[in-house]
Image: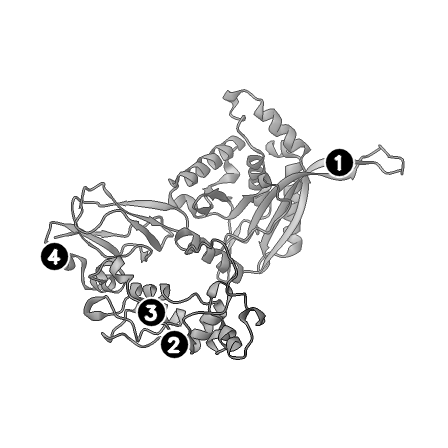
Amino acid sequence: MAHVLIMPRQGNTVESCILTEWKVKEGDSVDADSVVCMVETDKASFEVPAGEAGTVLKLLRADGDDVPVLEPIAAIGKPGEDWAAAVGGAAVEKAAASGPAESGTSPQAAASVAAPASVPVAAGQAGSGGAISPRAQHLAEKEGLSTGGLAGSGPGGRIIERDVQAALQNRPALTAAARAAAAAGGTVPATGSGFGGRVTAADLAGGGAAAAAGSGVTAAAAPGVAPANLDEGTITETAIKGIRKLISDRMHQSLAESAQLTLNASAPAVRLQELRARMKGSAEELGFAKVTVNDLVLFAVSRTLPRFPFMNALKIGDTLKTYERVHLGVAVDTPRGLMVPVIRNANLLSLRQISSEAKRLAAACQKGAVSPDELSGSTFTVTNLGSMGVSSFTPILNAPEVGILGVCNIELKPVAAGEAEDEDGYGVQFLPHIGLSLTINHQVVDGAPAARFLKALGDAVADIDLTLAM
């Protein structure tokens, strides 16, 4: 029987992966170790090997599909072998609804499906074949697109998702308001009066450029309407998908499901900088030469959090889970987007161990070699924009955590100079201070306790040499 390739489980907490790219096509011969596709979670990208040698009989999912783990994505076997029997009826049905197997045509042929010039909104209608896949139906309803005039490229003339996508490509772009109005009913004109030819809500209501033309008013004179001949220069449109879309969804979900409040403070950085300079100049065999200011802050956080367990916690539903151990998330900027690997048991590690682990995890994220388990399970997160000159910012919670620390740049600030006085009788000197921005979930953490934690952390940073002796 044919070998069924399933979507692998990338870590214990991953429920689905996005199939970003097929590396093979149907009919290709593969070895067991051949990479057949690339998949990604909201954390990282991974290669999926074939698992067995043979011929690619069927690709059951399309590029861009969000596939639950352990579901079939391809069948590999001997040429002519019955792949459907190995895959099973449910998987065959899903392949017909959304994957490459659902159409007998190439992507180029599917892209030739054109939308009508004027699109009445009756999204529930089916095409000439009388059937439409659930994914296609959902997309059509979301975009306010009638499927009545579409020719389906699926089995038996069934309208599938790529048919709707091709029709949308031939339809003028709609503003958000126009899309909402289209979904409620109306007619989408062939051209719009908005910026770049976009269809506006007024166009669907019979207004916009068309109404202006009927009244003898030029489009440029209509309120809110850009001149049709405006030189916009080059405009590039990029679909938000893959890890970028998942990050976008998680950020929005974090803000929607928590009450986020940010407190800003600063801590004296004289001893921090002095210690960093001494370590940088120390003997290589001591293992301190590569310790950074951020590593020192991570160490201070790991030693301060156990004194404030309400900050080292997760809010899951109506339950607050506080942790004895500190599992420290460290935000890492990568070409593929933001990743947050976890330094586990940070409160039990030495400064050298924290520094080494932070660098190892950051390098793995940059190379795309970090494992999913290394990207989950954090109880508190630190993100650093100080090297970019940021004085303060509002970090977004890494839900379900209840706190995240933003590390800012080091700036000179005026402080009292003790016995020294200037000609006006005031003793002032400028000393370096490091900015600290703490965001909390105000649903479970009040402002005063959070401020006490932030002050204690600032003291630990200011007296970093004493903190190291703890």
The correct choice, above or below, for 45 with respect to 107 in the image is above
Q: Amino acid at mark 2?
A: Val
In the visual, does 393 lie left or right of 48? right
Quarter occupied by residue 218: bottom right
For badge 1, the amino acid type reads: Phe
* 241 horizontally vs 208: left or right: left
Residue 79 place in picture, x, y as percent: 11, 50
Q: CA distance from mark 1 to mark 4?
A: 78 Å
Q: Position of residue 367 (x, y in %)?
A: 40, 38
Disc with the residue nearer the chain's start (3 vs 1)? 3
In the rendered structure, which disc, 1 or 4, sits on the residue that comes first in sequence?
4
Residue drawn 58% across the image and 22% down it: 281
Amino acid type at image mark 4: Asp
> Which residue position is annotated with label 1?
430
> Can you identify the residue that label 4 sits on?
82
Near mark 1 (Cα within 10 A), the count class, few <14, some 14-19 or many ≥20, is few
Q: Earlier in the sequence, mark 1 or mark 2?
A: 2
Q: Residues within 10 Å of mark 3 (few under 14, many from 20)?
A: many
Q: Is residue 295 left or right of residue 137?
A: right
> Label 3, on which residue?
115
Q: Which of the two discs, 4 and 3, labels the residue nearer the N terminus?
A: 4
Tally the numbered discs.
4
